[in-house]
Amino acid sequence: MKLAERMSRIGVESAFDVLVRARALEAQGRSVVHLEIGEPDFPTPAHIVEAAKKALDEGWTHYGPTQGYPDLREAIARHVARSRGIQVGPEHVSVVPGGKPIIFFPMLALLEPGDEVIYPNPGFPIYESMIRFLGATPVPMPLEEKRGFSFDLNLFRDRLSEKTKMVVLNSPQNPTGGMIPADDIKQLAGMLRERDVMVLSDEIYSQTVYSDEPPVSISSFPGMLEKTIILDGFSKTYAMTGWRMGYGVMPTWLVEAVTKLMVNSNSCTASFTQRAGLAALTGPQDCVTAMVAEFRRRRDAICKGLNEIPGFRCAVPGGAFYAFANVTETGMDSKDLADYLLYEAGVSCLDGGCFGEYGKGYVRFSYANSLENLMEAIRRIKKVSVKWEAAVAAHR
């Protein structure tokens, strides 16, 4: 037996591969600072954990509705309506185990071989993986450092075609931490409003922003609500990565399709975790405020430290918890540099090329780690930087 041909087109998430290599070094007694995984290092807030314990004690251990429990979907709809300034109800919500199903299921429901999907590059690798897996054509939009890691609207207009079936947006963005300016999103809405196209708006980092202005969702512009799939969840905002709790907000006709795919794959999202999700949304939010404030403190410190390293240039991100450093001036290939930092400095980070062709020349550092560990990583990188500093000096 051989695997189906489509399995040759599916990719992986490189962060987990790098984590395995880093753990192997630790098993040999090496010290490693982990800056590869995009996972908040904070514990899940106590009131959320207590809600899950209570749910287990009360018997929330059986199958639930495939679409999600009505009261949780109602709470999600209220939250999304309030935070995005749109009118949605529980009938528009699909609760799923993690955020990735809201990439996979809508793409599976909508895309045919030969359809084109415009997506950010560098970007979350699962976008391109799923596009290729389904036989559609990925059309990358370069995220430009000079534009704050947003993209050129004129280039976007040029890449739209009659074959464009979906556009993927992600703001705040992984891996760059960049945000699409509100006026650009308004112009994107104007380009897409009259087209037969759906927008997958990945807003998983919507509450991890460092300005007083919240990010703007394309769903809030006239004519776009019925064309938008909002992806969000609990993993990043409430430090609930292991709980596997995500959701999508979309037109009801697409909810029906996603529900069919859910019942054929997962049956439902775990019942007791949904009770925890309800507690997260309806309970105190000071835990979120405190976490974002700490991320801001870490962001400022790591970006300052990276910019002091020879050959590094790191823009200050507007959201998420990633520093995306330009390392072209080191004279080293970004993949070689990321490997060098792991094996020689004990700093585990990701080559920007893991996130697509236009990520080459950059290295991503997740600052979802303690300030102490971040500063230790900077110290270690500075210590080993003499290798490329000497090479660059010799070249000049």
Image (cartoon, grey):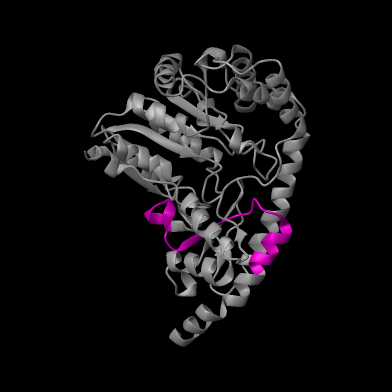
Q: Is residue 303 left or right of residue 95?
A: right
Magenta region: which residues?
Answer: 353-378
Q: Residue at x 40, y 31 (%)?
A: 104
> Which quadrant does the N terminus fall into?
top left
Q: Residue furthest bottom?
A: 394
Residue drawn at 61 percent across, 66 percent down: 29
Quadrant in which residue 164 is drawn: top left
User: How far from the left and from the top, in percent, is residue 393?
Assistant: 50, 85
Q: Quadrant of residue 279?
A: top right
Task: Tell me residue 289's x, y (percent).
Answer: 75, 39
- The structure residue drawn at horizontal position 47% and vertical position 82%, both measured from the top left corner, is 391
Q: How many marks?
A: 0
- Left or right of residue 42, residue 327 in this image: left
329 is higher (above) or lower (below) than 181: below
The residue shown at (51%, 28%) is: 230
Closest to the observer: 84 or 102?
A: 102
User: Magenta includes 392?
Assistant: no
Whether residue 198 appears in this view of the structure is no
- The reply to whether residue 19 is visible in this rendering is yes
Which quadrant holds residue 233?
top right
In this orientation, which residue lies closer to the viewer: 142 or 6?
6
- Return the x and y of residue 258 as percentages of the image width and height: 42, 20
Residue 348 in picture, x, y percent from top left: 55, 60
The reply to whether the magenta stretch includes residue 376 is yes
**Is residue 80 toward the left or the right of residue 51 in the image?**
left
The front one of 129 and 158 is 129
Q: Is residue 343 above or below residue 73?
A: below
